[in-house]
Image: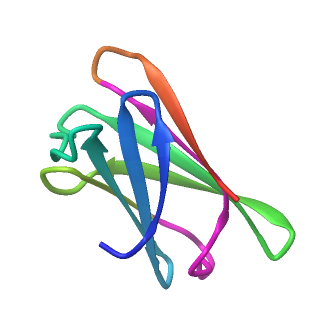
């Protein structure tokens, strides 16, 4: 999808910022889409020197989305934390 990617546990996490919207795509290590029903997450990025928390909810087969109060840079710095339906948590860091 053209965004920055990082590993988090058994997932590949890709972030695609578009204005104030953040899309987060999940795939497994075999590059298969991960169905995100029941997943949730939070992105925490430093934007203009301040931490910005973006709650994430399912929005399609392998996509979580959230909205920021300010525009998200194309290469944000920070982390995305994903919680699975079973309650386990993984984190992907973006530098």
Horizontal arrangement in the rendering, residue 88 relative to residue 62 (left or right) = right
Q: Is residue 94 above or below residue 28?
A: below
Horizontal arrangement in the rendering, residue 77 relative to residue 8 (left or right) = right
Q: Position of residue 64 (x, y in %)?
A: 32, 53
Q: Position of residue 47 (x, y in %)?
A: 74, 71
Which residue is drawn at the image coordinates 59% and 73% (left, top)? 69
Q: Position of residue 78 (x, y in %)?
A: 68, 55
Q: Is residue 34 above or below residue 14?
A: above
Considering depth in this image, is 64 or 92 the residue closer to the camera? 92
**Image quadrant containing the C terminus:** bottom right
Horizontal arrangement in the rendering, residue 51 relative to residue 36 (left or right) = right
Which residue is drawn at the image coordinates 43% and 71% (left, top)? 3
Which residue is drawn at the image coordinates 55% and 35% (left, top)? 91
Q: What stretch is highlighted in magenta?
A: 67-84
**Image quadrant containing the N terminus:** bottom left
Horizontal arrangement in the rendering, residue 67 relative to residue 39 (left or right) = right
Q: Does the magenta stretch include residue 78?
A: yes
Specify the farthest residue to the front. 30
Q: Is residue 33 above or below residue 22?
A: above
Which residue is drawn at the image coordinates 83% and 65% (left, top)? 50
Specify the farthest residue to the right. 49
Task: Name which quarter of the figure residue 22 lies in.
Answer: bottom left
Q: In this view, does 37 lie above or below 48?
A: above
Task: Name which quarter of the figure residue 60 lies in.
Answer: bottom left
Q: How is the image coloured?
A: rainbow
Marks counted in the figure total: 0
Q: Does the magenta stretch include residue 25?
A: no
């Amino acid at each position: 999808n053209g965004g920055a990617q990082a590993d988090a546990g058994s997932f590949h996490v890709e972030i695609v910022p578009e204005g104030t919207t953040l899309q987060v795509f999940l795939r497994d290590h075999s590059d298969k889409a991960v169905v995100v029903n029941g997943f949730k997450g939070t992105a925490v990025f430093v934007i203009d020197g301040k931490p910005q928390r973006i709650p994430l909810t399912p929005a399609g087969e392998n996509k979580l989305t959230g909205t920021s109060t300010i525009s998200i840079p194309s290469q944000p710095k920070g982390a995305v934390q994903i919680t699975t339906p079973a309650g386990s948590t993984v984190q992907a860091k973006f530098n």
